[in-house]
Amino acid sequence: QLNPRFRSIAKEAITKVHRERNHTTFYVTHDLNEAMLLADRIVFLTNGKVANVAPPRAMFELLLASNEEYVSAGVPRSH
């Protein structure tokens, strides 16, 4: 696991390279907030298989509506 400072530097570098070269970039994370901020599309895997592919907002809605406890537990909810 990267320390927070190095992680921030790495994210900035990846974003810069992606913008400059306009290549497809894969960034793997378990952090939903990070995925929501960085992604054009999010791929959600379940048991190593693609379960959903969607833009960040649509993915958030899919996860929020999920009946799977391990999925919905990671989605922040307003109280």
Image (spheres, rainbow, N blue to C red):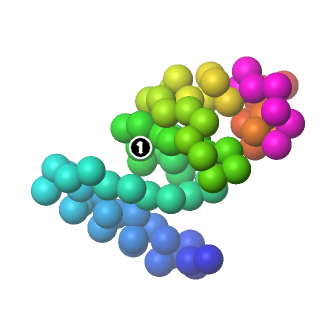
User: In screen coordinates, is 11 left or right of 74?
Assistant: left
Q: Is residue 7 visible?
A: yes
* Rendered image quadrant of residue 27: bottom left
Query: Could you tell me if residue 56 is visible in this image?
Result: no
Q: Is residue 23 left or right of residue 26?
A: left
Residue type, label 1: Ala
Closer to the camera in the image, 28 or 9: 28
Left or right? Give the position of 57 relative to 76: left
Q: Which residue is mark 1?
A: 39
Tell me which corner region of the image, top left, top right, bottom left or bottom right, holds residue 13.
bottom left
Give how far across and how far down residue 25 sits, in percent.
Answer: 32, 55
Q: Residue at x 76, y 39 (%)?
A: 71
- Residue shown at the point (75%, 26%) measured from the top left: 66
Residue situated in front as seen by the camera: 42 or 2: 42
Figure quadrant of the C terminus: top right
Question: Percent x, y for residue 6?
Answer: 47, 77
Q: Position of residue 55 (x, y in %)?
A: 44, 30
The residue furthest left is 21
Task: Note whether 17 is above or below 6 in the view shown.
Answer: above
Residue 45: % across, % down: 61, 46
Q: Secondary structure at mark 1?
A: loop
**Dot 1: within a 10 Å radius of its alpha carbon, few (fewer than 14), some, or many (20 or more) residues?**
some
Quarter holding residue 59:
top right
Q: Which residues are magenta?
A: 64-70
- Please report the residue visible at 60 percent of the width from the left and 36 percent of the height from the top: 51
Q: Is residue 35 magenta?
A: no
The quadrant of the rendering that contains the N terminus is bottom right
Q: Looking at this view, is 26 or 19 the one in front? A: 26
- Which residue is pictured at 56% across the width and 33% down the height? 52
**From the viewer's perspective, is residue 44 above or below residue 56?**
below
